[in-house]
Image (cartoon, coloured by chain):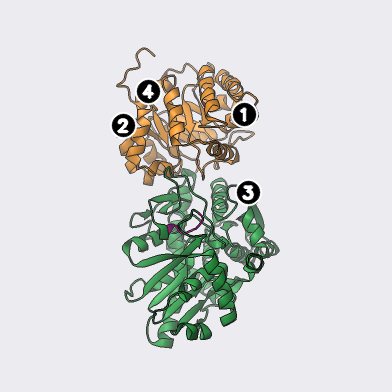
Amino acid sequence: MSTIEHRFGRYGGQFVPETLMPALAELEQAWLAAREDPNYRSELEGLLRDFAGRPTPLYRARRLSERMGRPVYLKREDLNHTGSHKLNNALGQALLAKRMGKRRIIAETGAGQHGVATATVCALLGLECVIYMGAEDTRRQRPNVQRMELLGATVQPIDAGARTLKEATSAAIRDWVTNVQSTHYVIGSAVGPAPYPALVRDLQRVIGDEARAQVLKREGRLPSRVIACVGGGSNAIGTFTAFLDDPQVQLIGVEAGGEGINTPRHGAPLTVGGRAGVLHGSLSAIMQDEEGQIIEAHSVSAGLDYPGTGPQHAFLRDSGRARYVAVTDAQALAAFREVTRLEGIIPALETAHALAWTLAQEDGELDLVCLSGRGDKDLAEVLALT
Amino acid sequence: MSDLTITQTGTERLARAFSEHGKRAALMPYMMGGYPTHEESLRIGQACVQAGADIIELGVPYSDPLADGPVIHAAGTKALTAGANIASVLELARALAPDIPVVLMCYANMVLAPGVEAFVDRLARTGACGLIVPDLPLEETEQALAACDAHGIALVPLVAPTTPPERLAQIGSQTRGFLYTVSVVGTTGERAALSERFAEVVAAAKAATHAPVALGFGISTPEQARQAAQAGADGVIVGTRLVRAAGEAQDPAGAVGVLVAELAAGLAL
């Protein structure tokens, strides 16, 4: 049986209260066993196919390609059930929780996409579900709050700090510390203590595995660039993983530049660089002050409004295998409108960051962008801001 | 403390605090550095000494304290807003250390920020005895343990009711100062009664280490402190109850002093 990474170079690890350590070990054992178990795999594959609707299409964006003078392919995770890539991970982890005999599920959410995916899977499997969400995010992603409640989940708004994803994640971890014996914490991104970053990547790599085969079939070649937005980085790592051993494919992670990376108001720890730090259980690129206090992030996109990032991304940056860039709120909002008009696809504001970077590139041969989610949830916010 | 010499390490001083307290168990109040203000938190520390505390656990306010419940989390946020930083909390440690052994409670990212060695060196210079890092489990402690050992600082590990026996033995064997035994599955905070399993948890911890065992999380009353001592705990840690009093009272130091005196009386032989 193979192992699961605890570290990616020097990043990763398990910086959590002792109370959680046995649960992390249990989760790791459960995942090692499940991923080799034909029953688990066939149940997950069946649900990904029949419930989620996979494989998602790889769409050659017609007018976007024409505009850019090169083929631009969109991996349509927005067509996954619940409207984003988040369901891939939520399905896999909830099935795992059932195997571990845990009937109560908790999760954090920023934009609400992971919360909706988790609430959906809990409805499907008959599990109790509590979603932690910053109070600011319950305001700016109202439709997703309503969806989660309709699905039977309890949405717990969090008033601490900037009332966004960081505080929601902290609240979920505190719940887990208290209820660890009965509860599984479905982390929504490739962050957190080991084994989560590897577990979430394993469950999201279906995005890149499908996209690689699809583009090869369609074009007979690999893309020159693969582009994805990065908050915690689950759609990005899920897309990148299939291409890691293809050195001719550039991997580009697009972070939230917020009001500009020369201001403190952004969510781009990988792009900005600086000393690594510990946030939510792992060592990675984070936003912090000199003494190690975590700095609040800012992004117009709730899903990228996070001062940390997955440890494997920090490793890929340092090794040079992937490159990380930032796109501002204004650029993302412009791309949101432009892609909507050009393609008839309303992207999530998170995804709009990856699209904005792609639209700004004059060169290139063949771009593949992970269209990580749909933007219906963002309409009120975008219309209010522009 | 006429025989307190410069050569005594923090670890040795803690050992003495556990053997010379003259009560059923050593009493270890927790205080949040810089809460409600820097000056008042110094007075709180002094009041603890006056009221019969044996060791002080001094918390460093942090932006994201994952092991803490709402009361201590809010106190830390307020202390940060009031301007507390690592330098000001270390000043408190320096001011209190001549009168009582001080153990600093600090989250991992703040220990890593200047580098573990630099952090521990700076801590040792204040005269503090120990360091507790609640989000630095066994797997991540190697560097911190080496730095603390080199500077005579006791790196105090935590165990929880969920810690399985083999792991407990591993942690117990590399315990310095005392074994911080978490009485409940959960974050810091007051509970109406001690966990049903607390005596079992204490017994398991005692069997796993030669070091003193201090019970914390969820202990708030003299009665609970006494029960912990009767179950065999060598030390009792009380935090949230005192932090709450510091936040609510007109005279925070006076209020904390009264509570600590009551806890000390509860532990009287």
Q: Tell me what residue is drawn at x 38 percent, y 51 percent.
A: A275
Distance from label 2 to label 3 (Cα)?
41 Å
Give the residue pinned by disc 1. Answer: B245
Give the residue pinned by disc 4. Answer: B13
Q: Dot 2: few (<14), some (14–19), or many (≥20) neighbours within 10 Å?
A: many
Where residue A54 sits in the image (x, y, percent)?
Answer: 53, 77
Residue type at tag 3: Asp
Distance from label 1 to label 2 (Cα)?
35 Å
Where residue A266 sits in the image (x, y, percent)?
Answer: 50, 57
Chain of residue at mark 4: B
Residue type at tag 1: Ala
Distance from label 4 to label 2 (Cα)?
13 Å
Give the residue pinned by disc 3. Answer: A159
Give the residue pinned by disc 2. Answer: B151
Label 1: state its secondary structure. Answer: helix
Asked if marks 1 and 2 touch (Cβ < 8 Å), the reply is: no
Chain of residue at mark 1: B
Residue B259 is at least partly visible in this image = yes
Q: Which mark is residue A82?
A: none
